[in-house]
Image (cartoon, rainbow, N blue to C red):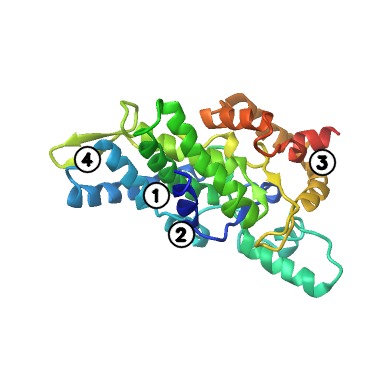
Amino acid sequence: MKIVLPIIILNLTIFAGEVDQYLAWNQLPNDESHYLNKLFNTEIQAALDEINKNHNDCSCEEAAGKILKHFGIGLNTRLEKQLKNSTEIDKYPNDETHISERYKKSIFRRELPFKNLEQYQDYSLEIYIDEVVNVGGIYIGLDKLTHFTASGFLYYKIYRLALEFVESKEAAMQMAIAMGIYGEKYILGKISSGVFSYADLESNFQGFQLALDLCKAGPTHLKRSGRGWELEGVFDLRNYVNPFWDESYNPSYYYENQNLSLMPKSQAVLQNIPHYCLKFQSDRIQGIFDYYDSMAKPSYSVKYLQQLIEKGELPDPSPFYIRTICEE
């Protein structure tokens, strides 16, 4: 398994974007649950059509994995690219967002001594920053949808492999989560962007949870019929998106080390988040956080990661939490 983890991570990609949740506070997008659910259900049906055509005798567990794999393995999957390029979905920033708002207010922006360096920084941020969308009142980066499907599939794959040689489902689950941790500590996080994203890890886990749910007798699951595998019920993304997908509510840890984005993060983020305290204290944003508090139910992954933080085995994101910063 120690050999498998880095190979799987490398199989994703070497470059990863990051989300700046605070930029979206300037213009919160409208709820796109209906649009996204329609898109997901169309893709799930396409996956089932292919399964029933070419793999009709596969098990439910194999079918669940193939459904997630259908969305693509790697960052910036076909679905994410489609949403990034779509003019039908409300997101922020968008093509109409003025550059002074899109980049110059980013928590990742640093004051640089030379104009040409600032121009490079603006260009990097344009490539680097992912858009934010609204799913049932929860604001998430578009990158989280790729984590949900692609990394969720990899969690599920490792989990099923691990079940063959570990003593419990919990141990197998922890091995799956270890893959996500490895990615954030190295290639997909610290090395590529200088960010260890706990929200990424939660969206990974919820994709894994979807794969498990598809073979349970829940409201949305797979069933065998004369035509092959069918989806019983309608998939609803809101059953999996939760406040821990929002990086302002579930903060990341930011490294100061050099990374492939050439933008060290820690000092810039700690200097810039306080600029959002007035906005954070507004009725609108406080209402969002109150809503999050009312519905936030930590998953197994959230609880397990918190245990690792308390043991000192994972970086502590609390210094980057806007609630703590603005209280101080």
For marks 4 and 2, the one nearer the N-term is 2
Residues packed near mark 2 inside 10 Å, few (<14), some (14 to 19) or many (20 plus): few
Q: Which mark is residue 278?
A: 3
* Quadrant showing the N terminus: top left
For marks 3 and 2, the one nearer the N-term is 2
Q: Amino acid at mark 2?
A: Gln
Q: Quadrant of residue 314?
A: top right
Q: Position of residue 210 (x, y in %)?
A: 40, 36
- Distance, label 1 to label 2, CA atoms, is 10 Å
- Distance, label 3 to label 2, CA atoms, is 35 Å
Between 102 and 165, which is closer to the camera in this rendering? 165
Between 155 and 33, which is closer to the camera in this rendering? 155
Q: Residue at x 57, y 53 (%)?
A: 188
Residues packed near mark 3 inside 10 Å, few (<14), some (14 to 19) or many (20 plus): few
Mark 2: which secondary structure? Answer: helix
Q: Which residue is mark 4?
A: 229
Mark 1: which secondary structure? Answer: helix
Q: Which residue is mark 2?
A: 82
- Distance, label 4 to label 2, CA atoms, is 27 Å
Mark 4: which secondary structure? Answer: strand
Mark 3: which secondary structure? Answer: helix
For marks 1 and 2, the one nearer the N-term is 1
